[in-house]
C-alpha cells in the first residue's frame, strides 16, 4: 500500500487509521470509518482499489463531489470516471468502453443509479472489487443530513452478496454508526473511529465588537487566499458581502434566496479560485472539497456545536494551519431563540439545549480543542493545544474571581433583577450613560465598583457567570436573575471561574505553533510565484487550482527548491504522474527565481 501511495499521491506515510481502514478493504471485511474532515478518507478506498482486481464502485451524493474526486484521481494518473445524469450519451459510452476493457479502477455513481435494476444487471457482468459509500451518515435518519435515496442501499447485500461494503463519514455518533450497520445489513463490520480533533485549526472566539473590523482583520492576514464567512441570516450575507466589496475585497455572496444560477456561478468561482471569499449562510458548503480554505469566520454564533464543527470542517483540509474566528453576541442568542421557538415538543427542547451548549462554549474558559472534542464524547489529553485563544493568549484565571463574581451578582440584586447584561456592566463600570443618571443608578452602592475594568471585560465575566449557571437570563426581557448557586457565590460558599482581565489590544499577537510550522523555511516570495504559475495552469486546464497541487505541496516546493525531476519527486504530495507532467514548468520558475 505504501508504495502505491508514494507512487500515485507522493505521500510517505499513513494518516491515523488509514492503514487499518485499507486493511479492511483488502481483506474484504465490511467497515464503517469515521474520520474528521481532512483525515484522508478518500485514500482509504482509492489506494486499495488500485491494488485489487476489478473495479471499485464509489457511491457519492453529489455530482460536484464526484467530479472533484475524479479530477483529482486523473491528475494523479489514475483511471477513474463517474456516471451521472448530467452526462451526454457519448460521455457515458466512453466510460462503458473503459469498463469493458477492464481499464477503470474506480467508478463513481449516485445511490439512485446503483440500485437501478438495469444497472445492477450491467454490473453483474463485470468484476467488482468492493463498494465504498462516501458521506455514509446520509444513510441514517439520526445523522445531520439524511437522504432517503441512501436508504435504498439496503438492497446491496442481497444483490451483491459476495462484495464487501465500506462506509466513510466525518460525523457519526454511536447511534448513527449502529443505524448505518443495520440499515445496509453490514456483516460484522469493523468500526474505526478517529479523533474528532483538528489540530491544525486555530480557534478564536470573540464577543462582537465592531464585527466588520473583526472580520477584516482575519481576511487581511490572508491576502489572496481562500476563506469563508458564515452569517446567520441572508440579510447579513448581503450586507457584509456588499461592505467587503466596497472596501475592495474579492468577494461573492451565497444564500438560498438567490437565483440558483447565480449561486452555482458563485460557488464555481470560489472553487476555481476566481474569487477569494464567499459570504454565505449555512446553505453553502455541502460538496465543497476545496482543500486550501485558509480561514472560516462565523460573523454570528451557529445554533449548535454540530453545525459549528461541520462549518469549520471546511477549513484546512490540507492539514496546514487555518484560522477559525467565531464572533458572538447576546443578540445572536436572541435571534436563534426566536427562530427555534417554532419547533415543538422534544425537537424544540433538544434544539434549545444545543443552543445553550453553543453559547456556553462561546463564553467558556477552557481550551477550545478540548471543549469541542469532549462535546463529541472523546477525551483530550494535551494540556495546551497551542492553537486556540485560551491556550495561545495564555488566558489565566483571575485569582480574585470570588470578589469579582460577588460584585457583579450584588449589582444585579441591587437593581432588583430588572436589567440586562449591558446595563449592569455599565453600572459596574461607572458609566455616565444618560439612562443610568436618569434612573439615579449612579447612587446605588455597586455603581462603579468595577471601574478599573473596561465594559467589554465586565460583559465577558457576566457571560462566564451565566454559562456556569450563576446567572439566569430572562428569555423575553433579557433581564438577569441570580440563581440559587449564584447566591452561594454571594455567601462565599462557592467560587466561580473567571478569566483574568486582559489588555484587549495585546491579544491576537501570539502566533500559533501550527502556523509557524506550516511556514517553516518556506521562501514566501517564491511561494507566491508558484501560486501564480499554478493558477495559470489551472486556468488553461479548467480545473480548480488545488487539483494541480495543494498548498502544502507548493510550500514544500518553496522550501526544498528542487532542481531536477528526481528532487521534484521528493516534494510532499508529488507522485510520478504529476512529476512527469509538471516538474519542468515548476523547476523553470524556481531556477529563474533563484
Ligand atoms: P476527507 O475526505 O477525510 O475529508 P481527503 O480524503 O479529502 O479527506 O484528504 C484530505 C487531504 O489529505 C487531501 O489533500 C489528501 O490528498 C491528503 N492525504 C490523504 N492521505 C494522506 C497521507 N497518507 N499523507 C499525507 N496526506 C494525505
Image (spheres, rainbow, N blue to C red):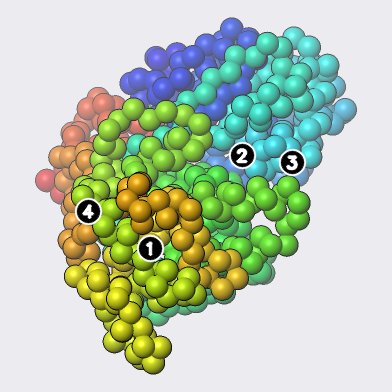
Residue underneath mark 2: 66
- Position above or below: 381 against 473: above
- Classify the position of the N terminus by image quarter: top left
Residue underneath mark 1: 409
Mark 1 vs 3, N-terminal side: 3
**From mark 3 to mark 2, how far is it between C-alphas?**
17 Å
Residue underneath mark 3: 147
Mark 2 vs 4, N-terminal side: 2
Residue 171 pos. (x, y %): 57, 35
Indicate which label's residue lies in the foreground, 2 or 4. Answer: 4
**From mark 1 to mark 3, how far is it between C-alphas?**
49 Å
Q: Secondary structure at mark 1?
A: helix
Crowd rating for badge 1 (residues with CA inside 10 Å; few <14, some 14–19, many 20+): many
Q: Which residue is outermost to the right? A: 117
Residue at 70% across / 37% down in the picture?
142
Crowd rating for badge 4 (residues with CA inside 10 Å; few <14, some 14–19, many 20+): some
Residue at 50% across / 31% down in the picture?
377
Assign ligand 1 to one image quadrant: top left
Residue 409 pos. (x, y %): 38, 63
Indicate which label's residue lies in the foreground, 4 or 3. Answer: 4
Residue underneath mark 4: 400
Specify whether 532 is left or right of 71: left
Q: Nearer the viewer, residue 465 or 261?
A: 465
**Residue 161 in view:** yes
Q: Secondary structure at mark 3?
A: loop
**From mark 1 to mark 4, how far is it between C-alphas?**
14 Å
Mark 3 vs 2, N-terminal side: 2
Amino acid at each position: 500500500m505504501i508504495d502505491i501511495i508514494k507512487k500515485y499521491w507522493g505521500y510517505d506515510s499513513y494518516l491515523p487509521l488509514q492503514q487499518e481502514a485499507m486493511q479492511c478493504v483488502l481483506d474484504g471485511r465490511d467497515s464503517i470509518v469515521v474520520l474528521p474532515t481532512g483525515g484522508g478518507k478518500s485514500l482509504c478506498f482509492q489506494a486499495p482499489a488500485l491494488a485489487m482486481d476489478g473495479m471499485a464502485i464509489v457511491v457519492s451524493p453529489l455530482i460536484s463531489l464526484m467530479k472533484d474526486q475524479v479530477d483529482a484521481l486523473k491528475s494523479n494518473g489514475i483511471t477513474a470516471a463517474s456516471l451521472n445524469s448530467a452526462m451526454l450519451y457519448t460521455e457515458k459510452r466512453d466510460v462503458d468502453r473503459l469498463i469493458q476493457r477492464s481499464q477503470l479502477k474506480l467508478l463513481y455513481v449516485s445511490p439512485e443509479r446503483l440500485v437501478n435494476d438495469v444497472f445492477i444487471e450491467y454490473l453483474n457482468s463485470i468484476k467488482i472489487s468492493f463498494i465504498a459509500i462516501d458521506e455514509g451518515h446520509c444513510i441514517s435518519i439520526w445523522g445531520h443530513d439524511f437522504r432517503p435515496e441512501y436508504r435504498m442501499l439496503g438492497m446491496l447485500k442481497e444483490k451483491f452478496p459476495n462484495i464487501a461494503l465500506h462506509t466513510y463519514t466525518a460525523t457519526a455518533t454511536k447511534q448513527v454508526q449502529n443505524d448505518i450497520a443495520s440499515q445496509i445489513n453490514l456483516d460484522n463490520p469493523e468500526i474505526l473511529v478517529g479523533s474528532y480533533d483538528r489540530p491544525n485549526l486555530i480557534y478564536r472566539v470573540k464577543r462582537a465588537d465592531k464585527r466588520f473590523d473583526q472580520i477584516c482583520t482575519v481576511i487581511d492576514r490572508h491576502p489572496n487566499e481562500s476563506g469563508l464567512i458564515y452569517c446567520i441570516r441572508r440579510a447579513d450575507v448581503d450586507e457584509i458581502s456588499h461592505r467587503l466589496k466596497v472596501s475592495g475585497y474579492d468577494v461573492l455572496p451565497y444564500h438560498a434566496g438567490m437565483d440558483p444560477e447565480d449561486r452555482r456561478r458563485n460557488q464555481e468561482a470560489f472553487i476555481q479560485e476566481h474569487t477569494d471569499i464567499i459570504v454565505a449562510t449555512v446553505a453553502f458548503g455541502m460538496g465543497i472539497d476545496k482543500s486550501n480554505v485558509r480561514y472560516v469566520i462565523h460573523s454570528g454564533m451557529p445554533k449548535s456545536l454540530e453545525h459549528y464543527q461541520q462549518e469549520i470542517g471546511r477549513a484546512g483540509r490540507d492539514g496546514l494551519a487555518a484560522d477559525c474566528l467565531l464572533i458572538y453576541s447576546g443578540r445572536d442568542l436572541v435571534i436563534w431563540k426566536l427562530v427555534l421557538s417554532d419547533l415543538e415538543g422534544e425537537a424544540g427542547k433538544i434544539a434549545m439545549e444545543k443552543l445553550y451548549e453553543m453559547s456556553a462554549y462561546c463564553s467558556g474558559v477552557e481550551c477550545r480543542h478540548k471543549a469541542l472534542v469532549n462535546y463529541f464524547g472523546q477525551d483530550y489529553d494535551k494540556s495546551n493545544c497551542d492553537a486556540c485563544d485560551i491556550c495561545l493568549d495564555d488566558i489565566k484565571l483571575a485569582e480574585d474571581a470570588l470578589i469579582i463574581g460577588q460584585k457583579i451578582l450584588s449589582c444585579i440584586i441591587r437593581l432588583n433583577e430588572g436589567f440586562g447584561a449591558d446595563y449592569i456592566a455599565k453600572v459596574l463600570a461607572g458609566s455616565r450613560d444618560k439612562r443610568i443618571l436618569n434612573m439615579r443608578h449612579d447612587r446605588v452602592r455597586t455603581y462603579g465598583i468595577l471601574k478599573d475594568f473596561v465594559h467589554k471585560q465586565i460583559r465577558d465575566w457576566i457571560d462566564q457567570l451565566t454559562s456556569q449557571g450563576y446567572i439566569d437570563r430572562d428569555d423575553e426581557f433579557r433581564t438577569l436573575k441570580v440563581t440559587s448557586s449564584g447566591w452561594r457565590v454571594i455567601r462565599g460558599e462557592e467560587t466561580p471561574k473567571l478569566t483574568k482581565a486582559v489588555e484587549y489590544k495585546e491579544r491576537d499577537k501570539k502566533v500559533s505553533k501550527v502556523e509557524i510550522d506550516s511556514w517553516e523555511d518556506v521562501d514566501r516570495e517564491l511561494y507566491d510565484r508558484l501560486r501564480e504559475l499554478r493558477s495559470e495552469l489551472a486556468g488553461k486546464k479548467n480545473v480548480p487550482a488545488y487539483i494541480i497541487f495543494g498548498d502544502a505541496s507548493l510550500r514544500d516546493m518553496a522550501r526544498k527548491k528542487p532542481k531536477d525531476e528526481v528532487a521534484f519527486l521528493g516534494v510532499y504530495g508529488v507522485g510520478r504522474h504529476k512529476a512527469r507532467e509538471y516538474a519542468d514548468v515548476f523547476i523553470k520558475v524556481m531556477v529563474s527565481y533563484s
